[in-house]
Amino acid sequence: MKERDYTFFWQGLEQDKRRLYGVGFAVRNFLLPSVEPPSQGTERILSLRLTTSSGPLHIFSVYAPTLCSTAEDKDAFYCELDAKIAEIPPKDNLLMLGDFNARVGADYITWPHCIGHFGVGKLNENGQRLLELCFYHNLCITNTFFPTKPHHRVSWRHPRSRHWHQLDLIVTRRSMLKHVLVTRAYHSADCDTDHSLVSSRVRFQPRRTHRSKQKGRPRITTARTSVPELRERFARAIDEALEDYPVDSVKTQWEYIRDTVYKVASDTFGKKVKKSEDWFEAGIEVLEPAITAKRATLLEYKRQPSARTMAAFREARNNTKRIARKCANDYWLKLCSDIQTSADCGNIRAMYEGMKKAFGPSAIKTAPLKSTSGEIITDRSKQMERWAEYYQELYSRENIVTDTAIRNIMPLPIMEELDSPPTIEELGKAIDSLACGKAPGSDGIPSEIIKAGKVSSLLGHLYNLLLKCWEGGIKPQDMRDAKIVTLYKNKGNRSDCNNYRGISLLSVVGKAFARVILNRLQLLADRVYLESQCGFRAKRSTIDMVFTLRQLQEKCSEQRRPLFLAFIDLTKAFDWPFHSPTQDWMSPQAPEADYIIS
């Protein structure tokens, strides 16, 4: 879950189980380019990999069984943790942090490689298990190696004995101890838990992880295209920017138009900024004073524990909870009112945006892919190679249609009008038919920007580019390239590529050019389609066929006659096109069929 400043990774039990514990990370957003997100973990152990200048740093978030847990649970936990540590190469850096529920004591003479001179308390059973694990893997407890104040070495106070203990530990390799500057507890941090915050300052320089995925262009604020003043300013800026329009090659022309339109649109309408405001941020002006007062009473209680300071802290805490409930109720009531207003006004987009805000970000579940032989692939680069292999095989597969089937299709008269160059009116009509609110391609230009530039010289320049593509029989490679986004179908194994739907994000200008061709081919298709074909036809819908089917059901029910229905589901019908048979059939219908832009 990505917020404004942090991205949260969390692992716990399933929703149908009681969530007694869980582990996670809160990562600063500027560190994300250097972080490899966790892929596999349990409700007690979660790991991520941080790329640094001195090599990979493996960080574990750990929650160990308590002292009252059964011996079987403790054995299972430490066996799993031992296996996780053994998978890390010895030269890689390791940092384990979390609630180990273990007291390691201060006996640095017996455990000289695991404990420093500044331990706290006595050793217990869980501490014995942890120290044995540390000794085996040459690890050390960083909490015990720094001469901090006594109350900075402890993190939890027993509710009955009122004694402080050191349960929240940060463990690292002995060879990595030189990179740790200090480890201490912060009792002033209000974390809404009986454990104090334990922090460790480590000397590492993050290094960006270079991946094959290129960073896309920032989104343009398309909502501002409805402002008349901005549309006029955009049209004037486009006219001025396209005065030095190159006329040499199709590729040069398109690149100049693409970069110019994006730059002018970004300067005029601005770049889209993600808003992740929740009820807490919406009521921060009211909540901040109450939180500050509660934190002050908490510090006073920790400095001077007494009935008076405890009563003051409870009063401040209850007041903060009351204000928080009021802010949350006000936020949700306003959000529900906005959703209802949008539904009553017919603003479906605003209604669904409000519903998404109410439901929160959806949990993204991932699983390692499987190769064609069924082997699990965990490496990210090899997973990308697997996706490339899958889609290359899928889209290059050719269906075979016999010559007899093609000859049995009734020949139709030649349509000479299909060979004439398109008009500027056809291009304008194709641009108007583009859907709004769709994700753009790699050029970052949405359809709203192209529509806003129709009143300027942009339409004429695009039309000249279309004529050159028409004469040459091909369009720029940038328009043909697609970014494929995989969406899980919510059925089947997540490791199987066949259970994902590929969504291709294409250039909007390329879509407009293809729409011009499609409108012409519709004239030919209307002569071929059967009368029963309603899907993918203008002014028709599958709703008509559903209505016809309902009528047949009613009539057969009234007359007590049997009705037999056959439903055929074609596997990947639109992913396996009939390229060669279609061209063989169209050649007699349109002699110049090779002009079709692919």
Image: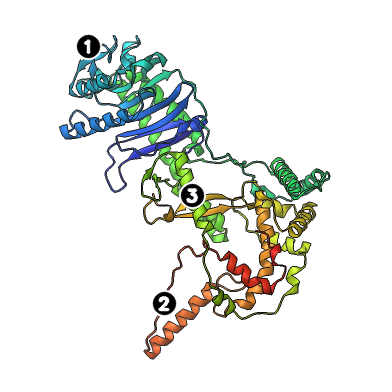
Q: CA distance from mark 1 to mark 3?
A: 58 Å
Which residue is at a point 51% across and 40% down the rendered structure image? Answer: 277
Label 3 crowd bin: few (<14), some (14–19), many (20+), radius 10 Å: few
Q: Which mark is residue 389?
A: 3
Residue 541, compared with residue 129, is above or below; it is below
Q: Amino acid at mark 1?
A: Asp
In 3D space, how far apart are the residues under numbered discs 3 and 2 (Cα atoms)? 35 Å
Please tell me which residue lies in front, 81 or 586. 586
The residue lying furthest to the front in this view is 403
Side (left or right) of 392 relative to 158: right
Residue 67 coordinates in the image, percent (x, y)? 19, 28
In the image, residue 495 above or below residue 182: below
- Name the quadrant of the N terminus: top left
Residue 86 x/y as whole percent = 30, 28
Query: Which is more N-terminal, label 2 or label 1?
Result: 1
Which numbered disc flags the more N-terminal residue, 3 or 2? Answer: 3
